[in-house]
């Protein structure tokens, strides 16, 4: 007979019920073919004595195994391992080999090397340059968490907790329509809003609706790289036009339109990403006229509308659009914090409806509790107060950062002081290389992480985008000090 | 001269600064060509007197307009409307027509009619049948909100608030690996986990990695319709096999594999969606053997692992997989509440890495604060306590619901009492039609919303899936009463 007594381990301290412990060990023995099909199992009384457990435990174990189909009960004959069970060829008793299955698949799948990006893991004591990220330390986390909890205490909140609207919470859409109409000069209704997870989902959905194989999209020669990659994943035909001090060169867009059908133009009109320049009034009107004439959509990514230091925010293209050409995308991720994935896609209703249908298959719906939290944050005026507060901080940081750069590195860099946003576009003199600088900087615990990202069109422009908003005054002085050490090292 | 005095409205009570009010009205006049290019604007002193505002206000207004590019300053000559501004052909002064742009786009985009689904809007006093959704009233909302707020008060929480891991919060991944190893018999590490937004994102990402044009996927003849739609969106070749009382008929899968290359099989092994049957032990082993032999991936969607009333949960296919064939997908959306979009995709590391790269372009990252909240909820044992609590409730509801159905409708329906899950698969006798029943039911304020969804392979099986978990005892009696009225009406 099979050595039942020595084959089972019973742990009376485990949280798992005894009958389940037994059942799972039976399954393992059957899978390993130590108990082969048709094997007769001991009677419940006999097994209970062998294993020193209550007979009811064995009965429950056998019932479990029958229900799961591992064993079968034959009336008047007893309990047998299921005769039809195939041998599991999966089972790999070499544990080292089994561990390999945690590494590699037993099947093929599609990989896209273009999606890879190196994220630097923060090392102890290092300062990291980024390409323009808000300072998480300024987030009104406690206020938002308090609101979140208060919303969760509402009597009828359970109504928001099941499957809900594909478009996002209705209250937020109403409040946001009102807020955007007031602050951006839009003239929209809640039906024109799809609440997304940050701007990225807006770009993703817009590209799904606009681009299929070989459809043409126009972007800047320098452009936000995540947008480029999103469009290229649609197998689209990505055409590039120049970017100068007034933003995208719209004359070049017109030339292309005369030659071929354009589906869409992607533009970061407020501060071009990465160069930070603003699209001029003249070009704004020209671009809108072209969109109307050639029937293309404009994806206007207004990622940093709120941050202007020299003048008021410039109204987006969407505010001048009366022919339904603009898809306007924004979020609170730059304004409040990236962890709060609340964004929006604004467009004519037919477009928003289709985007919502698509969104159902990505993640079904948003987070109604967080959406209500931000509804409250916007409506109460807290968002505007927060923007005013951090804008002063970021302006001071921009001024300090740019002054120190100018004072210390004018032999190496040139740059324009950005009128808004969170980053500077820094041109390195041609006789230096960011690659060498980045390598040397590591000696001084400075990681210039983003230097290689902004030349996707191979222009050799020798520029990088460096954010200043994340760093407080102490950080900025320290950052400049390490940059000085780096250049001293390179010069000597 | 242009009638400046009557063309501007100044609202001293508005929150908007006066200079901005002026500037925006200037922009509107320029856009409307009431002020044409090259028009000389009045001097600041003259305009300030005309409009009865401080001269500094006008100076600030002009500076704003210059910065934005609407006007230009010519030294010693004055301020002029920018000579190069094109006429905005967008502008539509017929307000009724302008409103149309909120409805329809001025460009073409791709629509997919297959994505549409009618969501019934709850009407006052109506009872709605769903296809198996948890009862939001049982959600431990206050506990979770309290934890959320406590996490937000942690001293270093700001470190979690910026751009973070594509894979999800590391603490949650560690805790979840441990939890799934203990409860599902898996043997994974945190590197095998991608935190997703609910199961749907897991299905979406897996389908992106596995399916391109014409790749073959096998599903059941009845199947979870959202999964079907997700796969079809990849333009895949969707092949169907029969589903009987033991789940997917794996012999049919084998026959297909002998004829053509299969990329993947989608299976809801625990309780087949929609029929609720469990995949038998025999078929589990067979399917795993086929996956190994023919090198395909198994997408195992374990959407209701936690709810078993007759026996313990059955270990998933993933627990027997030692050759890296299974992609295991689950979430807390059924267990806790759909509003909490926390799910997971478990697979060999190479697959998880690629899925994370793809996820970056969908919504960048998850919600670290919510992820930490659930990390706490799982680790503290609160999740298990919650499951035990609601399972008793749902079991009682299943028993009552099935008993009342059997007692009152055995002439009309047949069904098996489900061993687990939140729904019953109800077969209507052939001489009745769900369409008629649904129509009649509305007279009695009963909405049978989901009756038309589960015959995507046109089998004319005359079955629907009705959830019982959402309804408390009072609801269930009322629901049965309205169903009785409906059948009385049909019979008379």
Image: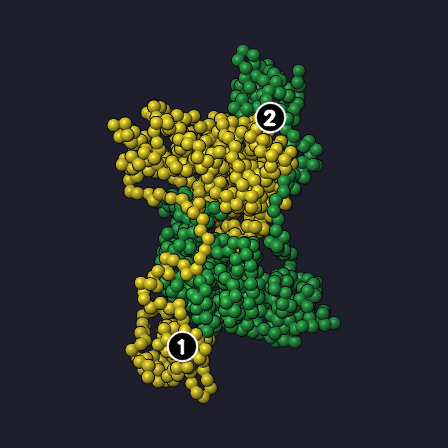
Chain colours: A green, B yellow
Q: Provide the residue designation for mark 2.
A: A27
Crowd class of label 1 (few under 14; some 14 to 19; many from 20; radius 10 Å): many
Residue B107 vs residue B290, the one in the foreground:
B107
- Which corner quadrant of the image does residue B62 belong to? bottom left
Picture coordinates of residue B175 (x, y %)?
Answer: 56, 42
Measured as percent of width and height from the top left, residue A372 is found at 40, 52
Q: Mark 2 lies on which chain?
A: A
On residue B61, which mark appears? 1
Dividing the image into 4 quarters, which one contains the N terminus of chain A?
A: top right
Horizontal side of residue B194 vs B475, given as left or right: right
**Quadrant location, the C terminus of chain A:** bottom right
Position above or below: B293 against A145: above
Q: In the image, what residue occupies the spot 61% across and 64% down?
A: A457
Q: Which residue lies furthest to the right in this view?
A: A492
Give the Cα separation between the discs numbered 1 and 2. 80 Å
Which residue does the image show at 49% across and 27% down from the upper left? B244
Say which chain tag 1 marks. B
Residues at marks 1 and 2 on the same chain = no
* Residue at disc 2, secondary structure: helix
Can you say whether A199 is above or below B239 in the image? below
């Amino acid at each position: 007979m099979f050595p039942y007594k020595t084959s089972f381990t019973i742990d009376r301290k485990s949280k798992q019920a005894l009958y389940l412990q037994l059942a799972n060990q039976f399954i393992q023995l059957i899978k390993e073919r130590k108990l082969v099909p048709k094997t007769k199992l001991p009677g419940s009384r006999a097994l209970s004595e062998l294993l020193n457990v209550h007979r009811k435990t064995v009965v429950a174990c056998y019932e479990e195994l029958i229900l799961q189909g591992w064993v079968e009960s034959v009336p008047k004959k007893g309990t047998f391992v299921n005769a039809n069970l195939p041998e599991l060829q999966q089972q790999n008793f070499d544990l080292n080999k089994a561990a390999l299955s945690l590494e590699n698949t037993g099947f093929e799948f599609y990989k896209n090397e273009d999606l890879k990006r190196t994220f630097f893991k923060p090392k102890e004591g290092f300062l990291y340059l980024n390409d323009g990220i808000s300072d998480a330390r300024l987030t009104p986390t406690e206020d938002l968490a308090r609101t979140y909890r208060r919303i969760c205490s509402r009597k009828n909140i359970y109504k928001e907790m099941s499957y809900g609207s594909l478009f996002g919470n209705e209250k937020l859409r109403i409040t946001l329509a009102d807020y955007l109409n007031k602050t951006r000069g839009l003239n929209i209704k809640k039906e024109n809003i799809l609440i997304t997870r940050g701007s990225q989902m807006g770009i993703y959905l817009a590209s799904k609706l606009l681009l299929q194989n070989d459809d043409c999209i126009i972007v800047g020669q320098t452009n936000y790289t995540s947008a480029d990659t999103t469009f290229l994943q649609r197998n689209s035909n990505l055409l590039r036009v120049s970017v100068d001090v007034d933003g995208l060169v719209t004359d070049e867009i017109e030339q292309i339109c005369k030659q071929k059908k354009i589906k869409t133009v992607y533009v970061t009109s407020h501060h071009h990403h990465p160069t930070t320049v603003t699209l001029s009034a003249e070009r704004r009107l020209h671009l809108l006229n072209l969109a109307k004439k050639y029937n293309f959509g404009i994806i206007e990514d207004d990622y940093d509308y709120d941050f202007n230091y020299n003048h008021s925010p410039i109204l987006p293209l969407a505010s001048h659009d009366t022919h339904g050409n603009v898809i306007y995308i924004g979020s609170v991720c730059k304004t409040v914090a990236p962890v709060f994935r609340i964004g929006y896609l604004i467009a004519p209703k037919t477009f928003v409806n289709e985007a919502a249908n698509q969104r159902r298959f990505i993640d079904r719906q948003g987070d109604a509790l967080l959406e209500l939290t931000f509804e409250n944050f916007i409506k109460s005026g807290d968002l505007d107060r927060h923007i005013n507060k951090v804008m002063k901080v970021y302006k001071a940081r921009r001024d300090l950062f740019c002054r120190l750069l100018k004072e210390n590195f004018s032999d190496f860099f040139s740059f324009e002081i950005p009128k808004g946003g969170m980053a500077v576009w820094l041109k390195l003199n041609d006789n230096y290389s960011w690659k060498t600088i980045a390598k040397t900087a590591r000696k001084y615990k400075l990681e210039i992480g983003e230097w290689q990202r902004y030349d996707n069109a191979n222009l050799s422009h020798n520029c990088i985008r460096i954010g200043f908003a994340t760093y407080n005054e102490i950080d900025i002085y320290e950052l400049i000090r390490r940059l000085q050490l780096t250049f001293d090292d390179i010069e000597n």
